[in-house]
Image (spheres, rainbow, N blue to C red):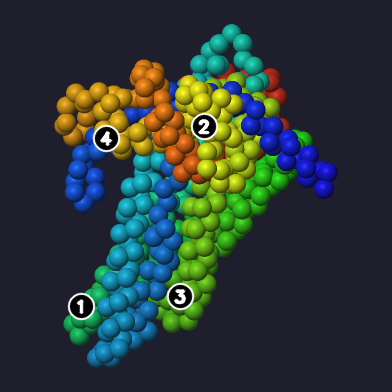
Amino acid sequence: MSDSNGAIEEIQSGLDSPPSSQSSMAEYATFVKMKTGMSRKLQYQPTKQYRLHNSMLAGVGFLELANVGDFAANVWNEIPIPIYAAVLMGVGGTLALAISVFAVRDAILSSRNIALLRKERYHLRTQREALAAGVEITSTCARGIEMQLDVNFRELGTELVDRFGMDITMGFGAVMVGVGTLMALGGENPLVFHASNLLSGYIGNSPAALYGLLNGIWSFYVLRRAMRHGAAAAKEVPEEGVLVVVKRRLRRVRTHAVINGLTGIVAGAASMVTATYWYGYPVLVPCILSAIFCNYIWRTRIGYDRPLTIKGPDLDKASLLEDLTHAISLQQVLAEGPAQPLARLVPSPKSITSVVDFIQSNDLFEDFCHRLLQDESFARAVLGPPANENENEELILEPSRLLADKTHFPRLTEIAETTVREMGLTRFKYSERYLVEALGCYLCCSKEATPATSQEALISAREEK
């Protein structure tokens, strides 16, 4: 029991001061006026162009369900079509096409993340080359950049394989299955009959097999990577409370990788069987359930939002552990549901400057500004009348602009309380997930590279350029 209390005390100590490496988390927030809602009223919305989003849609978890939309068409592949089979074909084909809409929408969201991650990767590589051109390269700088590149690689791979790749292959398959199944209703025409068999058979099901193979390879990589991170953390992380959080996160990643990889492979093979034999469909039932489970686990337990390239290269194990301890301690406070969370989280809760500093350093500034702008009368009092009322008008908010008039401080504090109470726990959970990922990458980079080899790698990168 004493060890457990000691671990809690270690984590609670993280409340004393925000981690220095997050002090420039968000220096300003950018909003654009656009039409929203059914009324199409002009409102300011965050541009969100510098943030990786945990934006996977729940609907894409049902893409495996689209695979069974052709059940009636393949089982009752006969003329004339029984009435009950025709009804099932209509339902199955429509369902497959409806699910494909989620794939299109999710592919668009994923493509935005991919574009941002590619920009971040280019920026990090530029930093690495700039360091290589310098007079002196410290091992901390080298490892910090390599760590961020490693995190970026995993995130980019997840977006390309587990999201965009899945959306394209499975979405295309869902469209083919849906169209082929609906065409089967007109199977009296021999040409339509054969086209329907092709679309709802091998053409519609082969993309699922392709995705299953690619996803299996990527899931195996993620599994091995999580195992390496876990082994490194067990040796390098001294704080028991932090180590428990790290192990829990990595256990979820490993579980997701195993189930997701096996589901893709089994479902891909079963979908090819269904093109000819009905007994492939019972195998797809557990695959559908596990795909929905994996989607839920990723969205609620593994995925995270984070600002892109927010930290400099001078990172080390101590700063990452400090940040992680801080995020864990903040979650513990908010999990208790305090009515006034700022009184528990901010050293000087009556100081609006301290409150805004806390909001900034913990990635809540954009949420804070968004809530301020939703109160239009107060926003007009703080910011003055807008320059124009045109759509796409851009607004940049900085703390100095918000704190210019002391008479607004009480209302600003209320908005800050609401922001922390409603969004704080989510943001701190996301921060914890990212920091565990970053810590694992840093520890593995530290094991694989000495200062000398890090410098040689940077110089080599410059020469190859």
Measured along the vertical axis of the image, is residue 256 above or below residue 390? below
Mark pair 4, 3: CA separation: 59 Å
Which residue is labeled 4 in the image? Answer: 376
Q: Position of residue 162 (x, y in %)?
A: 47, 52
Give whichever of discs 4 and 3 has the lower sequence position: 3
Q: Position of residue 386 (x, y in %)?
A: 21, 26
Which residue is labeled 1 in the image? Answer: 191
Q: Is residue 444 visible?
A: no
Which residue is labeled 2 in the image? Answer: 362
Residue 97 shown left or right of residue 345 in the figure:
left
Secondary element at image label 3: helix
Mark pair 2, 3: CA separation: 51 Å
Q: Residue at x 54, y 38 (%)?
A: 341
Q: Position of residue 374 (x, y in %)?
A: 31, 38
Q: Amino acid at mark 4?
A: Glu
Q: Residues within 10 Å of mark 1 (few under 14, many from 20)?
A: few
Instruction: Please name which of the two marks, 4 or 3, marks the residue nearer to the observer.
Output: 4
